Amino acid sequence: MKNKPAEISPGQETDKLKEIPKWSRRYALYRCFPAIVGFILLGLLFAGIAIPARFAGKASAEGNPVQYWILMTVMIISMLLLIFFVLTPWGRKITKRIGNSFYAQEGCAGITDPETIKKRERKGMLTGMMIGACVGATMPFVMSFNLSEKYLQPIAAGYCLPIILIGWFFQKDKVNPLGVLWVALFGLHAVLILTGAPIVFTGDWVALNMLIPMFGYGAISLIIAHFYSRYALKKLKASASMQENSNEE
Amino acid sequence: MEIDKVIHEPARLRIMMILQGVEEADFNFLLNTLGLTRGNLSRHMDKLESAGYIKIKKSFNGKLPYTSYQIMKKGLGALEQYWQNLDQVRKGSDLPAE
């Protein structure tokens, strides 16, 4: 956007300039395309484990060995890929490279320096592993108390949400605020299930009771954050763009 | 009262304001956001570094050189002082606020 000195008063120009840090910070805070790529990949891999696991049991019970081994192969490949992408530095590097390719043209602005990002990645991984372990422990917990599978998600919400909220509280000015939207939607989903809303998957699709709230709401929150970052960048450019009308004195 | 001439230049003021909002920004980001030429941006960044307002970090992203910038405490202080001085000058010369 070109400056029009004849139409913009000095006060208006100053106000526009004073907005630059706000928009640059918001852009940096909300840009999350690498996270969207990582999240979709994780969602697909978890689905690649949970859904075949369910149908493999059924195929085994029906005495269909071909179907059983195909599903087991899909599940094992998904597990190996999950380990590769989550636990190995090469896997994380590939995910990051795919995500960052979106920003190759516009460059990079961050609210944390690379050293802090490395520390945060370790903390994030630890939190993720804790949540993963808890989610894994939910199934035997539900089975041992003979609870209905529909309570899987509300039970998971009971421990996931405090862990995430505590983590968010300590880093709230450094992490994407829309993470809270995911927490709210996940919590709301749990409340709706407990109040008897007809949003429970049964039978063969029971795994979707966890996959949809976890990855579906996460994806919704990240996509909203991504579009907000594009809006913030547009506002930033409107306030800061020089269109090469500045020359070194 | 003196207006800081390093910051008062429009491009450098915008660079400082962008860096104030973030922890770190790279050359490409500033280039695209400001719409300056590479040479002009480089010269402005060198000037800001010479004044001790920003820190330039040079590294490699794979095989490609990568340059990023951080605003320093001195730069934040100078920017705050700049706006205070400018606001006072405006009040003194009785320019309209809007």
Image: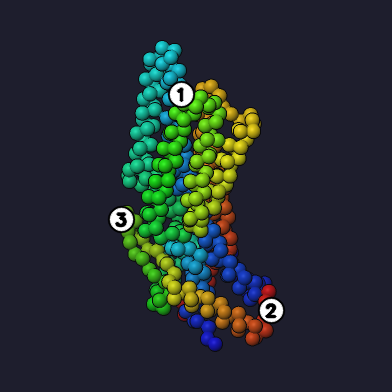
Locate residue A179, reporting x and y percent. Answer: 53, 48
Locate residue A82, reporting x and y percent. Answer: 38, 36
Return the chain for callout 3.
B
Q: Which residue is mark 2?
A: B96
Q: Which residue is mark 1?
A: A54
Q: CA distance from mark 2 to mark 1?
A: 71 Å
Considering only vertical position in the picture, is A78 above or below B34?
above
Q: Secondary structure at mark 1?
A: helix
Is A36 left, or right, of A82 in this rendering? right
- Amino acid type of the residue that numbered disc 2 sits on in the rendered structure: Pro
Q: Secondary structure at mark 3?
A: loop
Return the chain for callout 2.
B
Furthest-bottom residue in view? B1
Q: Is residue A29 visible?
A: no
Locate residue B38, reporting x and y percent. Answer: 42, 66
Considering only vertical position in the picture, is A49 above or below B17?
above
- Amino acid type of the residue that numbered disc 1 sits on in the rendered structure: Arg
Residue located at (37% from left, 54% from top): A118
Q: CA distance from mark 3 to mark 1?
A: 46 Å
Q: Is residue A200 visible?
A: yes
Locate residue A131, reporting x and y percent. Answer: 44, 41
